[in-house]
Image (tube, grey):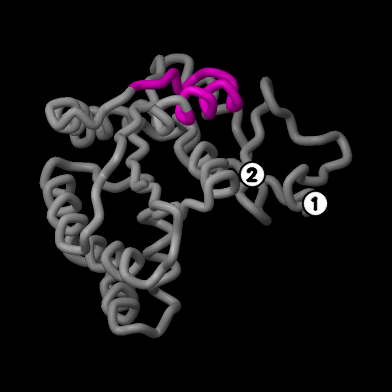
């Protein structure tokens, strides 16, 4: 089963994807992670990525699609989770063509809906573990008093993103709505779209997503 998680920055896509990976044996395909992995891989595609990034140039859609194709053809998984891709209608078309070419299908597109103001409040309070990426929040999931990550145990290595501030977040949200929100109508027209409350408790959101995938 292949799915897409749609939602603005901070909606919790990464957290939900990791839970699906652990529980269902799926593989998360995050654009940023794939680019970092490819850059250091030494493969032909990796060398292309490394060259582009070294020049400070933008990574093209063709390169990202090439990385996804490589994963689909070489990684055994109980389905793939596309996180952060596609972002545009052109990318959605390219992904659809790729899946068809390799004999795969897209089962569900899950939109994690949020209230912008609540999202800003959530993100400006978040920190991540430098060891494993586990997310903490000053209000709902504070860093443990002993300074140890509850997931990997690493101590005193928590970070806040420099752009996790109100002004930067509103800019990122605007970019999301301009570029990515058209995908909502695109996948609705294809009968693939389902919506969940992205600002619910983590377990509640996961239960909603499971209900969609099992329907």
Question: What separation in Å lies between label 1 and label 2 (alpha carbons)?
Answer: 11 Å
Quadrant location of the C terminus in the rendered image? top left
Instruction: State the SS at label 2.
Output: loop
Instruction: Between residue 191 and residue 134, name the one nearer to us.
Output: 191
Instruction: State the SS at label 1.
Output: loop
- Residue 209 shown in magenta: yes
Side of 81 where 15 appears, left or right: right
Instruction: Between residue 72 and residue 153, name the one nearer to us.
Output: 72
Would you call the spot at circle 2 few (<14 residues within 10 Å), some (14-19), or many (20 or more)? some
The residue wearing badge 1 is 153
- Residue at the extreme right: 146
Spot occupied by residue 18 in the image (x, y as percentages of width and height): 54, 45
The residue wearing badge 2 is 134
Side of 140 where 94 appears, left or right: left
- The segment highlighted magenta reads 195-210
Side of 98 where 83 appears, left or right: right
Q: What residue is shown at x 53% (from left), y 29% (from top)?
A: 206
Q: What residue is shown at x 59% (from left), y 41% (from top)?
A: 160
Spot occupied by residue 119 in the image (x, y as percentages of width and height): 46, 21
Would you call the spot at circle 1 few (<14 residues within 10 Å), some (14-19), or many (20 or more)? few
Seen in the picture, residue 139 relative to 95 is either above or below; the reply is: above
Spot occupied by residue 96 in the image (x, y as percentages of width and height): 16, 50
Q: What residue is shown at x 61% (from left), y 49% (from top)?
A: 133
Q: What number is the disc on residue 76?
A: none
Instruction: Give the quadrant of residue 213.
Output: top left
Seen in the picture, residue 173 relative to 56 is either above or below; the reply is: above
Q: What residue is shown at x 34% (from left), y 77% (from top)?
A: 46
Seen in the picture, residue 84 relative to 197 is either above or below; the reply is: below
Instruction: Give the quadrant of residue 150.
Output: top right
Residue 58 visible in image: no
- Residue 148 shown in magenta: no
């Amino acid at each position: 089963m292949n799915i897409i998680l749609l939602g603005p920055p901070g909606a919790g896509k990464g957290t939900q994807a990791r839970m699906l990976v652990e529980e269902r044996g799926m593989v998360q395909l995050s654009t940023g992670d794939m680019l970092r992995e490819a850059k250091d891989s030494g493969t032909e595609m990796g060398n292309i990525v490394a060259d582009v990034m070294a020049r400070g140039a933008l990574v093209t859609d063709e390169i990202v699609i090439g990385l996804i194709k490589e994963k689909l053809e070489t990684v055994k998984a109980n389905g793939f989770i596309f996180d952060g891709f596609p972002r545009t209608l052109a990318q959605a078309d390219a992904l659809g063509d790729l899946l068809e070419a390799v004999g795969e299908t897209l089962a569900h597109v899950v939109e994690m809906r949020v209230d912008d103001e609540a999202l800003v409040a959530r993100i400006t309070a978040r920190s991540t573990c430098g060891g494993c990426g586990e997310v903490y929040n000053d209000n709902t999931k504070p860093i443990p008093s002993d300074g140890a990550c509850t997931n990997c145990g690493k101590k005193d290595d928590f970070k806040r993103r420099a752009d996790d501030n109100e002004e930067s977040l509103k800019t990122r949200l605007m970019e999301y709505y301009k570029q990515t929100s058209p995908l909502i109508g695109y996948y609705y027209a294809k009968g693939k779209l389902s919506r969940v409350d992205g600002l619910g408790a983590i377990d509640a959101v996961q239960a909603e997503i499971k209900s969609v995938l099992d329907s």
